Image (spheres, grey):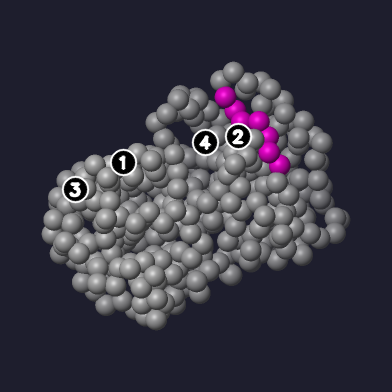
Amino acid sequence: MKKYPIRILQNVGSISLGGMEALIMNYYRFIDRSKVQFDFMVRLSEEDSNYYGKEILRLGGKVYRLPIYNANTHKLFLVELYKFFKQNAEYKVIHAHSDITSVFYLMAAKAAGVPVRIAHSHGTNYDKNWKAMIKILAKPFLNTCCTHRFACGKKAGIWLFGKHNKDSVMIMPNAIDTALFKYNAAIRNDIRNELQVNDNFVVGNIAKFGEAKNHDFLIEIFHEIVKLKNNAKLVLVGDGELKAKITAKVSNLGLANKVLFLGVRKDIGRIENALDVFLLPSLYEGLPFVLVEAQAAGLKCFVSDTVPNDAKLIDELYYTIPLAKSAKEWAGIIVDNARYSRADTRERIISKGYDIKANAKWLEQFYITQYESVMRV
């Protein structure tokens, strides 16, 4: 039997700042790294997306960058993956987080003899770009390549693996370090002073600037909110390929002095303390990591009806609005329901099973059990 730590290969699109990446890093920080170590397989094209790179190395992990799949190089891509797994036979467990495109990594891993192959669903849909047809064709093969099915919630599991496999899907909560998000009035005052929003009604969104997050509609909603509350401010945290487009829209609507683009931040708990309401009009989601954090911070959330109900952890802090409603209707609902008493909700989040400490222990034991069962054969 191999001595600890065993090494688990985490297959991710990138190690930039995003919800899925933050989730994996949360587990990595709290897992017992003397028993289980994470290494990361990242797309070569994401070379500049290295937000967590230094931390991974500091925690004892490795980062491998491999060619990305595309229509012209798919043969080379699969060959390179196969060669990687053959040359790195130490990896008995691969945990793939790329939703449908995990099929390519798991297919190569299966061919190379990797015995434990986990497919993990983090969403309920995919961007409608040039990759969509590849994903449609590849999706049916995923169940034949994986040995275990994980998902962030029930809806995400059914979307990726099908209803016929729903009973075999293990739900791995999007757990957080709840201590970082505890509501604190003093911290709220400090960060509101820092952002110069002391007397404002502060709406917030924390997300990658990508198609799924629907920032275009979010700005339209905020434009309507300003008509109802002239002291409204919008705080946007994150980065992404659509940020320039959204910045231009803000300027064109005359909202430049109303919107704060804070970029990538490490102090998300402090930012959420500063907000009055959280807005997430996403086109689709799995179980948004940021909604767990927001509710842990005692923050009222206004969320599109495309987000699975699994994300509702504290009823009085969670307001669902149909995405079919207009921006004006959204604004009216938000303003009419914006009054509430801010409180420390950390223990309620823990009681729902979203605290990282207990969940990291569960994942650690799962990996060890799978590894040891393989090594006994």
- Label 1 – label 3 distance at C-alpha: 19 Å
- Which range is magenta? 64-70
| 255 to 112, vertically: above or below | below
**Residue 67 part of the magenta-drawn span:** yes
Of helix, strand and loop, which one carries label 2? helix
Kind of residue sitting beneath label 2 = Ser
- Foreground label between 1 and 2: 1
Q: Quadrant of residue 126?
A: top left
In the rendered structure, which disc, 1 or 2, sits on the residue that comes first in sequence? 2
User: Whole-percent x and y of residue 133?
Assistant: 46, 24
In the rendered structure, which disc, 1 or 4, sits on the residue that comes first in sequence? 4
Residue 100: give its label: 4
Rendered-image quadrant of the N terminus: bottom right
Kind of residue sitting beneath label 4 = Ile
> What residue is shown with label 1?
248
> What residue is shown with label 3?
327
Query: Residue at the location (24% across, 66% down)?
Result: 201
> What residue is shown with label 2?
45
Kind of residue sitting beneath label 3 = Ala
